[in-house]
Image: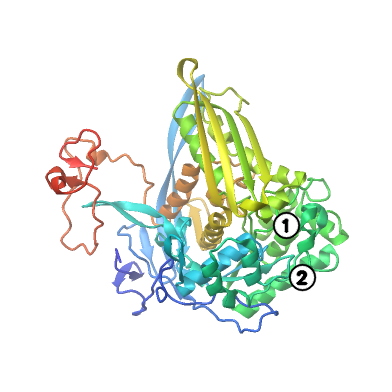
Amino acid sequence: PLYSRSEAAGGRSVRGGLGGLTLLRGGGGRRGRGRRSSLTAPTGDSDTEPVFATQFRMAEKFTIESPDVTYNKDYIEAVYPYQTTHVYEEDGSVKVKPCSTKFTFRTERKVPKLGVMLVGWGGNNGTTVTAAVLANQLGLSWMTKTGEKVANYYGSLFQASTVCLGTGPAGDVYVPFKDLLPTVNPNDIVFDGWDISSMNLADAMGRAQVLDWQLQEQLKPHMKKFHPRPSVYIPEFIAANQEDRADNLIQGSKKEQVEQIRKDIGDFKAKSGVSKVIVLWTANTERFCDVIPGVNDTAENLMKTIECGREISPSSMFAVASILEGCAYINGSPQNTFVPGVVDLAIKHKVFIAGDDFKSGQTKIKSVLVDFLVSAGLKTVSIVSYNHLGNNDGKNLSAPEQFRSKEISKSNVVDDMVQSNPILYKPSEKPDHCVVIKYVPYVGDSKRAMDEYTSEIMMGGTNTIVLHNTCEDSLLASPLILDLVILTELCQRITFKTELDPEFQTFHSVLSILSYLCKAPLVPDGSPVINSLFRQRTCIENILRACLALPPQNHMFLEHKMQRSFVTTQMPAHSAVQSIPHKTVKLNNILHKNYILNGHTNGYAN
């Protein structure tokens, strides 16, 4: 490991981990790597007994040497100066005032046994994420026409990306994102869920046609044991072409259906032994639901609507049931699940909700490219996005009302970037933005996306960028599901306060820190909506750094831009850190290596 594990008590560092506990953590690999644990607690349809994962306290990969950070057996506590800049107008002139607010962050170190219940468990995303976690648990490998593949978590922010912890004698030091704070290992997640189709997960995995055949053959004996619980089916909310799947339904009134969902959550929690449950919607896109005063505008009216059997979407019914059970609820589809009444209910019960719509392919690229164009001073005037796909999501989106939900979530992704540059855009001016989605059964889960970005450049010129993107839809969405639930669970263990707060508080019930993973981020009322991918990722990273009293990464590198640097470049004699090889080498070493020089250097080459 890059760093020795450490545990601290009462601010005193204690080397050697937790009482000699050895914890192997890995995102996958060949058979035998990592630690085995339970994948899912079987429902009543299964013939197996549940297997319980071990609940443990995570050993940190590094410790912070600062008077602002205290470690004890339960918490990491950090004092953090939050720097902001206030801009205001006074006497006809603009004033800019730097501000600092003292925060105290407290992060629970004990990582719970997490249960995740998926609505749409038998769909492409549900079967793929379940199969992926199982394959990683078992350390499976399989052959394809291009060679051997090994189970991994590529595409996951927490499992497969890194953050710069700081700068060491040999250069920047990077650690896995998951190691900034104690987080759930995806191999330890326990899955369960609902689906309108009764098909077992092995057959559903075959129906999805996402994973390689040889991998499916290895997973079938495990996957066939899992059967989705009956779900809610209201035909007018999804496309008529989904009717042939609907053979596994919760019966009764809307009130009775919500009560059954609550019972299912309680049953799963009791039988699996999990200490925490998060519910995530990965089922069909629904049509938008009208927001009607007296029906769904407040928590009280929404509960009356359920009682009386008036209109409410299935996704909102699952949200209500989850909130009443104290379980965080995440919406991975574009419909307006979170009508005002659902948001109100979540705030009153102090339960996290987040969404909307997984940001996995075309929209993620768009939130990067438009940010780049506008930041570079190029006026993007036209964006045309075309998609075709052949999975069940595409089939459902072939209906106009369901497509409209998706069109809305895809179309607003550039708004904040456009508004950030009043030099290019007048008030209320936006680029022309057209989104097209077509259903082509043959391409299956391998979605094609074609985009054209046209921008005005200097002196009346025009610049056009055209992209073709082939996305394996469910293999991109599945790691997002893991990130969403892992980050949500972490946020449930973080509390903070300012000097004016009498006690610690949690994040707002509308968990906007998850915006990086969503096309149409849900934010608290009155908060700015951020779609820029880099700003969203930086938000997550800096909040986690704040929990360790670490400053934000500013990328200034002033110590390398001055004649007399104020930092030492010598390795401390007592350092136990194993340095990462630096990306630079002396020029006299490159004569025998295949390096390419780019630009002028002063003795070092990148």
Q: Say whether residue 282 is left or right of residue 548.
A: right
Residue located at (31% from left, 51% from top): 166
Q: 234 or 57, which is in the foreground?
A: 234
Helix, strand or loop at label 2? It is helix
Image disc number at residue 315: 1
Q: Quadrant of the rendered structure where residue 603 is?
A: top left
Q: CA distance from mark 1 to mark 2?
A: 14 Å
Query: Mark 1 vs mark 2: which is more N-terminal?
Result: 2
Q: Amino acid at mark 1?
A: Ser
Identify residue for label 2.
260
Which quadrant of the figure contains the C terminus? top left
Res. 313 in view: no
Q: Say whether residue 57 is left or right of residue 41.
A: left
Q: Position of residue 174 (x, y in %)?
A: 33, 55
Residue located at (84% from left, 49% from top): 294
Q: Say whether residue 445 is left or right of residue 287.
A: left
Q: 269 or 18, which is in the foreground?
A: 269
Residue located at (46% from left, 75% from top): 56
